[in-house]
Image (cartoon, grey):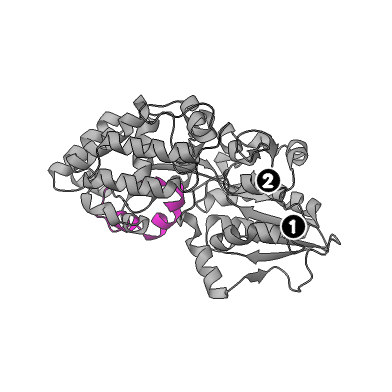
Amino acid sequence: MLTARRRTAALAAAAMSGVLLLASCGGSDGGSGDGKTLRLWHYEGPESAMGVAWEAAIEEFEKTHPGVKVKFEEKGFEQIQKTAPMVLNSSDAPDLMEYNKGNATAGKLSQQGLLTDLTAEVTERGWDKKLSAGVRTTSQYDAGGVMGSGKWYGVPNYAEYTLVYYNKDLFKKYGIEEPTTFGELIAAMDKFVDEGVTPLANAGAEYIAQQYLYQLALSKADRAWVDTYELYKGRTDFHDAAWTYGAETFADWVDKGYLAKSTIGAKVEDAAVSFISGKSPILFSGSWWYGRFKAEAKFDWGTFLWPDTNLTLGSGGNLWVVPKAAKNKDLAYDFIDITMSEKIQNLLGNKGGVPVAADPAAITDPQAKQLIADFNSLSEKDGLAFYPDWPVPDFYNVLVSETQKLITGDAEPDAYLDALQDAYDKGAPKR
């Protein structure tokens, strides 16, 4: 999903530096193909879980590869998004790069012949055995650049998923138990409304509102439904039972006061601050908020998976990709292997990330253990259902504007679903 999410720190760093930051070694002739320099690009902030883990991986790599240096260049997310096709088609391509997953990004580059086919390395090094089916989906792309099958063009270095964050202090104040079923969640929200408290933090101007609605639809869906919608395996009908339930229930939640109409113009930052400040007792959003809440929330809080559903929004994280023009591919493969090791994956988990190949027993922080345990539970049941804006170009903006109409009451659920059907059908590839 192309949103601000975890990229705040990296973008800020890129803005301050202008173009890039160099670490681990000096010089300007990296990537010479002499096997002595690994040029690495990624956009994770240095204080983030991923940034800390990849820095440790650099140290491990240089220790196990005497005489080889890593030339790390930190790029902003948007910088890589905009320039990758041009840079990767030149002699300035790095040896290894973090890149966004999905049909419109990694899939497009693979279709253009700009990425190295990693299938043989994935099999030989056993990376495929470490990744669940839902995480693997965004690693493989067919000849048309559509994810889910074909050759491996990327390896996910972490994972992400959505979950319910809740303010334990507010629940305790109003005598409300942690919900374990969907019915109990509804009862909890009714109690908050009765007490004059809007239960759900929301952002109508960005991705959070549409994710509430998509999760409601997912609670009535199955894997085949997701594959039809996200992978074009059949025709998506936005007036089916799942989408209809999602739209009608979302509109009903606005009428009942679970979601405030005033959040029509709210950004994701507004929703996060509403939770961090103790105003909103519940926020349904991604694991990418964990580190910030851990650092800034001054109250007792916890998490749980959306109740009574087998599916929730989520996927493997961004990908390690090896440009076709990379000059030191073997070094790139070795570095990926180190980031997939238990040592680095365990560090990632303890710093608040969601590792894809950690030892659960090595995670010591209680909240981090819960975060990872919930992800493992989702992975085991193939419960990652990707994101609603992925299937077609510009669908994110369509979802934002149309969901805002449900918040204000300017559109009925039926008209909302008509608008989504029209935009989807125009953008989906003919297969």
Q: Is residue 318 left or right of residue 173?
A: right
Q: Which residue is mark 1?
A: 95
**Residues at marks 1 and 2, CA–CA distance in whole angstroms:** 16 Å
Q: Residue at x 70, y 68 (%)?
A: 24
Q: Residue 143: x, y in percent? A: 68, 37
Q: Residue 60: x, y in percent? A: 71, 57
Residue closest to the eye, 39 or 373: 39
Q: Mark 1 falls on what kind of element?
A: loop
Magenta-highlighted residues: 272-298
Say what amino acid the circle numbered 2 marks: Ser
Query: Is there any visible trace of residue 174 in the rendered image?
Result: yes
How many badges with numbers are in the image? 2
Q: Is residue 171 left or right of residue 362?
A: left
Q: Residue at x 72, y 53 (%)?
A: 323
Q: Are marks 1 and 2 in contact (CB under 8 Å)?
A: no
Q: Residue at x 45, y 29 (%)?
A: 236
Residue 191 against residue 237 in the figure, above or below: below
Q: Is residue 347 left or right of residue 92?
A: left
Residue closest to the eye, 57 or 314: 314
Say what amino acid the circle numbered 1 marks: Asp
Residue closest to the eye, 396 or 269: 396
